[in-house]
């Protein structure tokens, strides 16, 4: 649904390179920011750029045509559509942390909110922000940097390449720390033509402070979202670490020491390697995409204290730890409103729909990816609660048959646990995990769920507290 529009155009402001030119639209942070902001504007989330622009909603006919192409050609389209969003490395000195923050805050309607969230990206919490009616400000953003000539299975070469170009970015932005991430398992296609430069804020900065002061009344609540997920990294400089691998189907052990699964994967893709030769890790750092950089907390605490805001820390170890809590909150809230609360919507990475979850009375269960750990998290959840009558699932296609990626048949066993009706949302099963049209089709098909309910008013923080008190220690999430 469409009502209102983004404030981005009025608020990007300033001189130089616009943040919208170098913030990845296909990343978790930008997608979840836009999904949250769109909901607060009364809009749904037709992916709006959370995948490469060549596969955006305006390109639905093109996306369908891409799905009909031979496999290798489809992969090439994916590679080059992602590369089209990457900034040239010589322009990294023009990246500006305050411009990124201005772009982020510019997504939101200008009004007063009962609270705000700051910190780690998390798809389950997007649904919590939606029902509370509050904005979320990311700590982490992905700046994709155009890079050729580095083989996906050579992480050492990628780290050396990054050493040359990262200093310009860091010198221009003393409030940022750089996590250069290289994942040849899930991101094999994308990293053929780009480097993943993830930047994390160490301090709020003036733009975030201004937004908070204008958007919150004294006594409002600031939620700090702290995902404690870490990864072995190699220190490059004071504010620059290199991360080989990432959360997903392959384990840390497999990235650094190999396995039969890794050997089979590399052989299938014609690699000259049979295991990855990683730079030697020398410390543990917050995971590049999901982890929280603790240096920001002190600045948020100081700002909240000075302005009379309440501070609440939401602390968890892994991204999907929050998903059962949010699902149960929705199910309980639906039941209290007299709804059936019998429909589960399993979301996948950036394929999510906070607006249509509420309009269709669907209980959202967000999964990080369509990988084996995510499949297990859904199975564990379904084994712990009363059965659902209906289960619908989305599957994010990252383009490769990576280590730890279950088959569609395995995922079908999850939807098959519904008592009455089940199925996939926007998935062309025989094309997975190269089902690129799913990036636009999921939004069309989720609206085909026939139920319609009035959009509720915001859930109060008091009602949230009551649910959390009743839950006690049932979930792997701490509210401090």
Image (spheres, grey):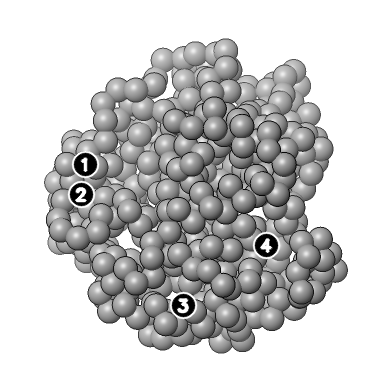
Q: Residue 12: which disc?
A: 2
Q: Residue 415: which disc?
A: none
Q: Which residue is mark 4?
A: 185
- First in residue order: circle 1 vs circle 3: 1
Looking at the rendered structure, the number of numbered marks drawn on it comes to 4
The reply, left or right, for residue 164 in relation to residue 263 is: left
Q: Secondary structure at mark 2?
A: loop
Crowd rating for badge 2 (residues with CA inside 10 Å; few <14, some 14–19, many 20+): many
Q: CA distance from mark 1 to mark 3?
A: 32 Å
Crowd rating for badge 3 (residues with CA inside 10 Å; few <14, some 14–19, many 20+): many
Q: Secondary structure at mark 1?
A: helix
Residues at badges 1 and 3 in contact (C-beta under 8 Å)? no
- First in residue order: circle 2 vs circle 4: 2
Relative to residue 141, is residue 117 depicted above or below? above
- First in residue order: circle 3 vs circle 4: 3
Q: Which residue is mark 3?
A: 162
Q: Residue at x 58, y 63 (%)?
A: 192
The quadrant the C terminus occupies is bottom left
- Place residue 109 in its image quadrant: top left
The reply, left or right, for residue 236 in relation to residue 175 is: right
Q: Residue at x 42, y 37 (%)?
A: 48
Relative to residue 142, is residue 154 depicted above or below? below
Residue 61: image x %, image y %?
54, 27
Q: Which residue is mark 1?
A: 9
Q: Residue at x 42, y 82 (%)?
A: 164
Residue 26: image x %, image y %?
48, 49
Q: Secondary structure at mark 4?
A: loop
Q: CA distance from mark 2 to mark 4?
A: 35 Å
Q: Specify whether residue 101 is in view.
A: no
Residues at badges 2 and 4 in contact (C-beta under 8 Å)? no
The reply, left or right, for residue 152 in relation to residue 17 is: right
């Amino acid at each position: 649904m469409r009502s209102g529009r983004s404030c981005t155009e009025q608020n990007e402001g300033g001189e130089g390179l616009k943040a919208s030119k170098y913030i990845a639209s296909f990343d978790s942070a930008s997608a979840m920011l836009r999904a949250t902001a769109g909901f607060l504007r009364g809009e749904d989330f037709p992916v709006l750029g959370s995948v490469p622009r060549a596969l955006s909603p305006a390109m639905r006919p093109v996306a369908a045509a891409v799905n009909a192409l031979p496999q290798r050609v489809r992969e090439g389209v994916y590679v080059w559509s992602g590369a089209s969003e990457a900034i040239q490395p010589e322009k990294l000195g023009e990246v500006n942390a305050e411009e990124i923050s201005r772009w982020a805050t510019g997504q939101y309607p200008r009004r007063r909110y009962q609270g705000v969230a700051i910190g780690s990206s998390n798809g389950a919490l997007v649904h919590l922000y939606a029902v509370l009616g509050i904005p979320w400000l990311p700590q982490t953003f992905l700046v994709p940097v155009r890079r050729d000539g580095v083989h996906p299975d050579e992480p050492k070469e990628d780290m050396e390449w990054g050493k040359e170009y990262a200093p310009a970015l860091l010198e221009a932005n003393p409030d940022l720390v750089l996590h250069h991430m290289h994942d040849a398992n899930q991101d094999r296609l994308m990293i053929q033509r780009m480097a993943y430069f993830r930047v994390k804020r160490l301090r709020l900065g003036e733009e975030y402070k201004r937004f908070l002061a204008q958007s919150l009344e004294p006594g409002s609540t600031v939620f700090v979202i702290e995902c404690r997920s870490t990864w072995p990294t190699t220190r490059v400089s004071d504010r620059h670490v290199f991360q080989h691998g990432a959360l997903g189907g392959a384990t840390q052990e497999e990235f650094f020491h190999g396995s039969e699964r890794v050997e089979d994967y590399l052989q299938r893709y014609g690699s000259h390697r049979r295991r990855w030769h990683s730079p030697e890790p020398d410390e543990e750092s917050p995971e590049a995409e999901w982890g929280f950089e603790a240096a920001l907390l002190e600045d948020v605490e100081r700002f909240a204290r000075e302005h009379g805001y309440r501070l609440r820390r939401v602390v968890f170890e892994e991204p999907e730890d929050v998903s059962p809590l949010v699902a149960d909150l929705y199910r309980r809230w639906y039941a209290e409103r007299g709804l059936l609360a019998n429909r589960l919507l399993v979301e996948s990475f950036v394929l999510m729909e906070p607006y249509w979850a509420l309009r269709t009375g669907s209980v959202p269960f967000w999964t990080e990816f369509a990988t084996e750990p995510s499949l297990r998290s859904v199975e564990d959840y379904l084994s712990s609660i009363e059965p659902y009558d209906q289960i619908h699932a989305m599957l994010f296609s990252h383009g490769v048959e990576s280590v730890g990626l279950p088959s569609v048949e395995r995922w079908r066993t999850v939807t098959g646990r519904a008592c009455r009706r089940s199925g996939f949302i926007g998935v062309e099963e025989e094309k997975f995990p190269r089902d690129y049209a799913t990036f636009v089709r999921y939004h069309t098909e989720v609206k085909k769920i026939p139920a319609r309910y009035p959009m509720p008013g915001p859930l109060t923080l008091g009602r949230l507290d009551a649910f959390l008190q009743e839950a006690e220690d049932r979930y792997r999430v701490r509210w401090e």
